[in-house]
Amino acid sequence: MKDTLRRLCQENEGQDIAEYAVMLAVILVIVVGTIRLIGSNANTVFSSVASSIKQ
């Protein structure tokens, strides 16, 4: 395991993989945060529309 990690750190491909992992983590945090913000607002809008349709 140590040899694999050492090899990844020395090779450029290992750095590319680490960069992609960091970018993926940042994108996931942004997406999850956006969904949480929009999700609560969307729920309110859909509830309002549903109550309007019932009347």
Image (spheres, rainbow, N blue to C red):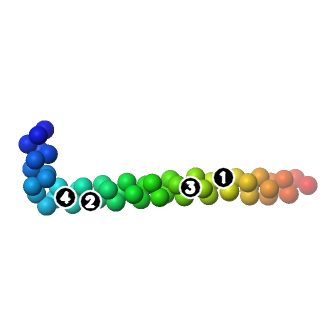
The residue singled out by tag 3 in the image is 35
Q: Residue at x 19, y 58 (%)?
A: 15
Q: Residues within 10 Å of mark 3 (few under 14, many from 20)?
A: few
Q: Earlier in the sequence, mark 1 or mark 4?
A: 4
- Position of the C terminus, as image quadrant, is bottom right
Which of the 4 image quadrants contains residue 19? bottom left
Q: Is residue 30 shown left or right of residue 41?
A: left
Which residue lies under the disc numbered 1? Answer: 40
Q: Which residue is mark 2?
A: 19
Give the SS element for disc 3: helix
Name the residue located 84 percent from the left edge and 53 percent from the top edge: 51
Q: Amino acid at mark 3?
A: Ile
Helix, strand or loop at disc 2? Answer: helix
Query: Which is nearer the N-term, disc 1 or disc 2?
Result: 2
Residue 15, labelled with which disc? 4
Tell me the distance, in whole angstroms, between the alpha carbons under discs 1 and 4.
38 Å
| Mark 1 residue type | Ser
Identity of the amino acid at label 2?
A: Glu
Mark with earlier residue (4, 3): 4
Check disc 2: other Cα within 10 Å, few if <14, some if 14-19, many if 20+.
few
Q: CA distance from mark 1 to mark 2?
A: 32 Å
Q: Which quarter of the image is occupied by the N terminus? A: top left
Q: Are marks 2 and 4 in contact (CB under 8 Å)?
A: yes
In percent of width and height, residue 23 lies at 34, 60
Q: Are marks 4 and 3 in contact (CB under 8 Å)?
A: no
Q: Secondary structure at mark 4?
A: helix
Q: Residues within 10 Å of mark 4 (few under 14, many from 20)?
A: few
Disc 1 element? helix
Q: Quadrant of residue 42?
A: bottom right
Closer to the chain start, of discs 3 and 2, is: 2
First reached walking from the N terminus: tag 3 or tag 1: 3
